[in-house]
Image (cartoon, rainbow, N blue to C red):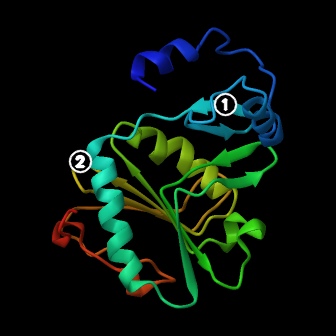
């Protein structure tokens, strides 16, 4: 879907007034009956359907490179899921770029608190990922959340979730060492990666 198509399918006409909330099941049914194209990139945040920005080339190159890098260093006790559909509750569904969770947790049973690390790669959605998404993930108790700027290779790491947002938020440059607290074998410097 092009940017123009996304603009045609979205509206801000009801800003400031209550809107009907949809459940994840409602949206899945809309896809089944053809009201929503099955290839449309959507998330559901608190019952609101949010169209996702198209993935840029920088995003895809970095995602593939990170998948290769982390796939070779993944500890046996963890699973890495790429672009998983993640149901945080009945009215919230997101598709982050990566989640890492214990092998002992079944994928269908996963909760935000089970996730060791969640990573969003952004080019056009960086501000959204660092504000709205950070607050959302913190409210669900997600322990460690990274937002990576696909163009500048800078990273914001969010740790220590609280109801109002993460208590520990730090920015890192491309040459800084990034190390997940619960998965130190996945540590890296983005500037050292050979982009695939």
Q: Is residue 11 above or below residue 190?
A: above
The residue carrying mark 1 is 49
User: Is residue 50 among the parts visible in the rendering?
Assistant: yes
For the residue labelled by badge 2, is the local secondary structure a helix, a strand or a loop?
loop
The quadrant holding residue 163 is bottom right
**Percent position (x, y) of residue 88?**
72, 54
Disc 2 packing (10 Å; few <14; some 14–19; many ≥20): some
Q: Is residue 193 left or right of residue 74?
A: left
**Percent position (x, y) of residue 79?**
56, 78
Q: Residue at x 42, y 16 (%)?
A: 4
Q: Residue at x 39, y 87 (%)?
A: 185
Q: Is residue 176 above or below residue 64?
A: below
Disc 1 packing (10 Å; few <14; some 14–19; many ≥20): some
**Percent position (x, y) of residue 115?**
62, 71
Residue at the limit of the structure toward the bottom, as seen here: 76
Q: Is residue 164 left or right of residue 89?
A: left
Q: Is residue 112 left or right of residue 180?
A: right
Q: Is residue 12 left or right of residue 36?
A: left
User: Is residue 155 among the parts visible in the rendering?
Assistant: no
The residue carrying mark 2 is 151
């Amino acid at each position: 879907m092009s940017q123009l198509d996304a603009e045609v399918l979205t509206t801000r006409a009801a800003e400031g007034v209550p809107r009907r909330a949809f459940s994840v099941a409602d949206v899945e049914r809309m896809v089944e009956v053809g009201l929503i194209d099955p290839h449309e990139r959507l998330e559901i945040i608190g019952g609101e359907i949010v169209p996702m920005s198209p993935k840029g080339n920088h995003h895809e190159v970095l995602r593939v490179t990170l998948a290769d890098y982390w796939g070779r260093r993944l500890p046996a006790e963890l699973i890495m899921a790429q672009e998983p559909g993640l149901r945080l509750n009945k009215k919230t569904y997101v598709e982050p770029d990566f989640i890492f969770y214990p092998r002992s947790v079944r994928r269908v049973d996963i909760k935000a608190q089970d996730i060791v690390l969640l990573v969003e790669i952004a080019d056009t959605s960086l501000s959204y990922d660092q504000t709205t998404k950070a607050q959302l993930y913190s409210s669900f108790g997600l322990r460690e959340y990274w937002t990576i700027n696909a163009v500048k290779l800078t990273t914001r790491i969010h740790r220590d979730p609280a109801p109002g947002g993460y208590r520990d938020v730090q920015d890192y440059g491309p040459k800084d060492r990034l190390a997940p607290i619960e998965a130190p074998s996945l540590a890296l410097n983005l500037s050292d990666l050979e982009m695939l």
